[in-house]
């Protein structure tokens, strides 16, 4: 798939509100709408406007910020070189690529999935 196609896939998340988040070994952000989209973050992240840099996604600081983002719409989702930026009106969550692990993934219940592989390459499955 050509790189220009990735931006179209990411654009499908814009305008969807964060309806819940779940915490385990990482954090999962669930977005409203059909198809249902979820963003799973399994690497340290940064949150601009909250002065959080390279924090574990399960830290108390991150959880407090996520709670404040509930029901806020995503403005855009951008990927560059394996780095994911999820932009809300009040702040941006950034997840850098990880050289040893899958840093993040986005999936939808229509079969679409994007996985940031170790080193930043993307694996993409298109909707059914």
Image (spheres, helix red, strand yellow):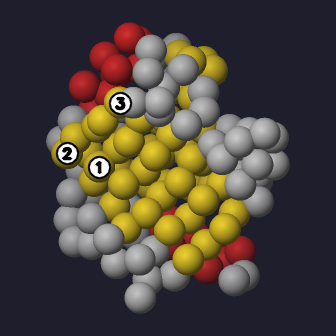
Q: Are marks 3 and 1 in contact (CB under 8 Å)?
A: no
Query: Which residue is depicted at the point 78% across and 39% down?
Result: 100
The quadrant of the rendering that contains the N terminus is bottom right
Q: Position of residue 49 (x, y in %)?
A: 47, 22
Callout 3: SS: strand
Alpha carbon of mark 2 to alpha carbon of mark 3: how far?
Answer: 14 Å
Q: Nearer the viewer, residue 27 or 9?
A: 27
Q: Earlier in the sequence, mark 3 or mark 1?
A: 3
Callout 2: few (<14), some (14-19), or many (20+) C-alpha neighbours within 10 Å? some
Question: Residue at (35%, 50%) from the top-left corner?
Answer: 74
Q: Quadrant of residue 21?
A: top left
Gap in Å between the C-alphas at discs 1 and 2?
6 Å
How many numbered circles does the render carry? 3
Check disc 1 and report its element: helix, strand or loop: strand
User: Contact, CB < 8 Å: mark 2 with mark 3?
Assistant: no
Q: Within 10 angstroms of label 1, few (less than 14), some, or many (20 or more) residues?
A: many
**Residue at mark 3 to residue at mark 1: CA–CA distance:** 11 Å
Does 27 sit above or below residue 37? above
Left or right placement of residue 73 versus residue 122 in this view? left
At mark 2, the secondary structure is strand
Q: Please tell me whether residue 114 is drawn above or below residue 28 in the rendered image.
A: below
**Which label number is shown at residue 19?**
2
Identify the residue at horizontal 34%, vertical 78% (top origin): 110
Nearer-the-camera pick, 72 or 124: 124
Q: Which residue has dot 3 on it?
A: 23
According to the image, label 1 marks what residue? 30
Up the image or down, 103 lies above or below 115; here it is above
């Amino acid at each position: 798939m050509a790189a220009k196609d990735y931006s179209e896939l990411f654009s499908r998340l814009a305008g969807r509100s964060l309806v819940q988040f779940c915490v385990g070994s990482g954090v999962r952000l669930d977005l409203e709408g059909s198809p249902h989209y979820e963003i799973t973050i399994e690497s340290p992240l940064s949150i601009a406007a909250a002065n959080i840099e390279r924090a574990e996604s399960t830290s108390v600081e991150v959880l407090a910020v996520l709670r404040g983002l509930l029901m806020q719409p995503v403005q855009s989702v951008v990927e560059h070189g394996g780095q994911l930026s999820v932009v809300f009106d009040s702040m941006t969550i950034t997840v850098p690529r990880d050289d040893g692990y899958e840093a993040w993934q986005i999936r939808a219940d229509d079969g679409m999935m994007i996985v940031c592989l170790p080193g930043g390459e993307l694996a993409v499955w298109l909707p059914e």
